Image (spheres, coloured by chain):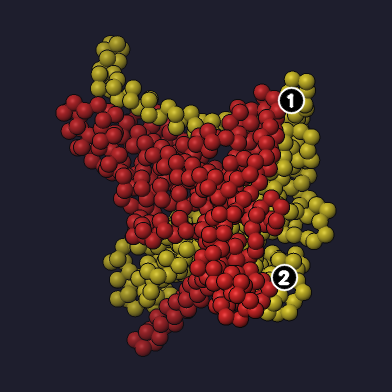
Amino acid sequence: MSNSVLKRRMSPRTKKRLAFYIGMVSLPLIQYIFFVFVVNFNSIAMAFQEYELGDNGYVTKLTFDNFAWAVDLFFNSGYMIRTSFIAAGCNIFIVLGLAMFFSYYCAKKYWMSGLFRVVLYAPTLFSAVVFSILYKFLANDVYMEYTGATLGLFDQDINTQLVVLLFFNVWIAFGSNVMIFVSTMSSIDVSMVESAQLDGVTPFQEFIYIYVPTTYSTLLTFIIGQLAVVFTNQLCMFTFYQGIGNEGGVMLRPETFGYYFFRKMLLADYCGVEVTYSKLAALGVLFSVVLTSTILPLRKLLIKYGPKTE
Amino acid sequence: MSTTKKSKISIFKIIIATVLILYALSIAFVIGWGFLTSLKCTMDFSDKRNYFGLPNLTDWPTLTTKEVAKDALLFGNYAYIWKNFTYTVEANSYYSKSGVIEVGAYDTNIISLLFNSFIFAGVGCFLQALCQMTMGYMCAKYKFKMSSIIYTTIVVMMSLPIVGSQPAEIALLKDLGLYNSYLCMIIHKFCFGGIHFLLFYAFFSNMSNGYTEAAEIDGASQLRIYLHIIIPLSMKMVGTIFLLLFINAWNDYQTPLVYYPSFPTFAYGVFRMSTVTGGTVNTQGTPQRFAGCMILALPALVIFVCFKNILMGSLTTGGLKE
């Protein structure tokens, strides 16, 4: 019975399809398993390992020092945590807020909306390097020339530098998010909007009571996305500061966890350096644990208490 | 009553339009200023501090300096960068399981940087778009158990905020001897997952089985169906996703810096050009650097101008549409 079932299931056509399927998915699947599962498993494993260079390459031993280092760094880096959350706050409240208004304008096809959509997409076309080079020159040399200041904006106190950086990041942040908001808003049922208009709603009321609730799931995805990168967002600091941090520096630089993590990663090695791959792996695991334990419940709360379309 | 409403409508729209106009002007100003600066000679820009004026062609003491200024206006800085931009890629040594691997320092030029960009952004993103399409097709049209496992895994992994695994990835790539190589560049890009996979999955799920079934009845093999029916049908979507991936990868300088430091792309070259004066990077001054920036921006800009309707249109209905 079971053989006949098997035979029926594995007809020549199915066999051919299965063979082709295996042939086509094998390589991408191996790549995915390696770069997602093996790498993440290795990240957890490395967090508990310490490397030492022996005669025949390096040897590893079990340790909890990496986590001790990561926890100590995390809870003693109030400034980096604050800066990271300020950056996330800017992205959520300013960038996404403005993006919603801009998208509404474009989706409603108001005056020059086509041109504005292109302009909003422009920063995505240009590398952040290009904009940062131009912006830094304006904020430093041109600012000094026209104001008579002795220091450029990027050489002033740490708070001014942070504001200048945040402004830059907000300035270049409209691109794909506006495009996706526009696409979501364009798919809103026209009859709903028209009946609201017949009831005499103003565009602002229309935006608040129709467009925001119906695009809330997209907005929520972006909010969660911004929170998920709170510890990896560099605020383009590497582009502006080229990996210079605050260790032994004369001038204080603003720093997010993302920037700290990235520049340490470039200098890291298995052993023999101040920050090893193992320590950074432990920090990465700590980030993931903190984010998973906060974002998933937060997402549920936002879904439960967020605006409803009914 | 209606007058009040109309004035409210106007105010709301006017406020957004004003902000958008200011934003558009700021973007246009910075890009225009960068382009204008790239047409000035260094003496004009840096010595005379002609930051915002048009290129100066008259007020020069000698004929030679006047010629230099004229040359700059005729894209001389672009020609200079094209011919003279050199960059010394630092030596790199690292441990792997097979021992210490040493990569010596070497001089690179713009052609070499553009070649690396072509491999990274062109070949890599083409493979990525193809891989996404293939996996989307396989999972949508081949209803094996593995397909639903793959789909569920992708969705679950997308919802988990797992970050900071790059150090372990670098260590693993070094162990396998893949770190810092063209092979790594290709393998890295030959991936699927994320929003693009889901878009292809949705696209193929909504596609009628009529084409493939008719071809099967006519005796076409699965490979033939894939090559002669599926790829042509999804070519527009593959092309759109390729263009989006290409623009991102072309502008990305951090991924090559982290994973293939001995194979810097042009974006990384421009980053170095902006940060290092003299020494390992050979550029003259700010106008030349801005010319480098404009050269970097050119391919993405050309792609956008040529495929504006496809790119903007593709993003206006349901994220991406076919």
- Chain at tag 1: A
Image spot of residue B19 (x, y percent) = 50, 75
* Chain seen in red: B
Which of the two labelled residues, at mark 1 and mark 2, occupies the earlier sequence position? 1
Residue type at the position of mark 1: Tyr
Q: Is residue A150 visible?
A: yes
At numbered mark 2, what does the secondary structure look like: helix, strand or loop?
loop
Chain A shade: yellow
Q: Which quarter of the rendering shows the C terminus of chain A?
A: bottom left
At numbered mark 1, what does the secondary structure look like: helix, strand or loop?
strand
Residue type at the position of mark 2: Gly
Q: Mark 1–mark 2 contact, CB under 8 Å?
A: no
Quarter of image, res A80: bottom right
Q: Residue at horizontal 70%, vertical 58%?
A: B277
Neighbourhood count class around disc 1 (C-alpha, 10 Å): few under 14, some 14–19, many 20 upward: some
Image spot of residue B322 (x, y percent) = 31, 50
Q: Is residue A61 visible?
A: no
The circle drawn on residue A58 is 1
Q: Residue at horizontal 55%, vertical 68%?
A: B72
Vertical position of residue B95 compared to residue B72: above or below: above
Q: Residue at horizontal 46%, vertical 36%?
A: B190
Image spot of residue A271 (x, y percent) = 76, 33
Q: Nearer the viewer, mark 1 or mark 2?
A: 2
- Read off the residue under disc 2: A152
Between A284 and A143, the residue placed more toward the observer is: A143
